[in-house]
Image: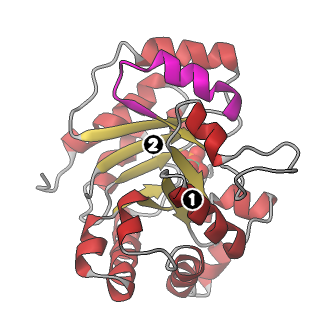
Amino acid sequence: MRKKIVAGNWKMNNDLAETEMFLVELKKQVFPENVVVMIAPSFTNLNHAFRSLREHPVKIVAQNMHQSNEGAFTGEISAKMLKSVGTNTVIIGHSERRAYFKEDSAILADKVNTALENEMTAIFCIGEELEDRKKENHFQLIKTQLSEGLFHISDAAWENIIIAYEPVWAIGTGETASPKQAQEMHKFIRKTVAENYTEEIANNVSILYGGSVKPDNASEIFGQEDVDGGLIGGASLKVNSFMEIVNAFEKETGNRT
Ligand code: PGA
């Protein structure tokens, strides 16, 4: 079912003490009932965050995982390990993983399968580089990322998929896609899902926008018809700015329910 979601991707930030400080503040907050709130701390702090937020409506998400269920993969983390520490959701294919860790579509498709086999939800990230947009190749690129990484899954598996559209040129740069550009791409993504699956599946999938979402631009972006929330990097590291974004749906100009 399509949901409003705000997920904080902490990346390689916040050690245990900093995580604890964040959680103490977060637990004082009142969360809107109609928004699913998620945070993705580092692997080392997942269990601490899970235990600390047990009574709170905040989901703990992993930033990555290995595609194999177990084995000789020094330094890697499996789906089973994530589940055992309280994490049922994992970000797959973030552009930093694609660029710095050379995760290609074949690896990402395997990771999606492993997440689904383990009854986890995958936040599958897609997004074009500035070059692609300049060459007006961005729609084709997004279509390819979707078909190579995601479109092998069954109809039923869509229950456990969230898509995050994050134009690479907008990540951590202070540069955001305009609300119109975000809507245009989100609509295209939904249409592409409908063409490859069904209208119903396309209408039910949540599509998040990511890339320099801040308290002052969140409500306009979230107000777009096909934008169901955000994957937030920098602005998710402070409780105040994160909560302003979580509450940004309230201020939307559109008339969504
Ligand atoms: P940003 O990161 O909000 O700092 O641009 C978003 C992301 O990479 O998920």
Instruction: State whether residue 174 appears in this view.
Output: no
User: Quarter of the image holding residue 186?
Assistant: bottom left
The relative height of residue 97 versus residue 200 in the rendered view (above or below) is above
Q: Nearer the viewer, residue 170 or 77?
A: 77
Three-letter amino acid code of the residue under disc 2: Ala
Name the residue beneath numbered marker 1. Answer: 170
Residue 22 sits inside the magenta stretch: no
Give whichever of discs 2 and 1 has the lower sequence position: 2
As helix, strand or loop, the secondary structure at mark 1 comes to helix
Q: Residues within 10 Å of mark 1 (few under 14, many from 20)?
A: some
Q: Residue at x 36, y 74 (%)?
A: 155
Disc 1 C-beta below 8 A from ligand 1: yes
Q: Which residues are magenta?
A: 43-59
Q: Residue at x 62, y 49 (%)?
A: 172
Name the residue beneath numbered marker 2. Answer: 7
Residue 226 is labelled as: none
Disc 2 C-beta below 8 A from ligand 1: no
Looking at the image, is mark 2 or mark 1 nearer the viewer?
2
Q: Residues within 10 Å of mark 2 (few under 14, many from 20)?
A: many
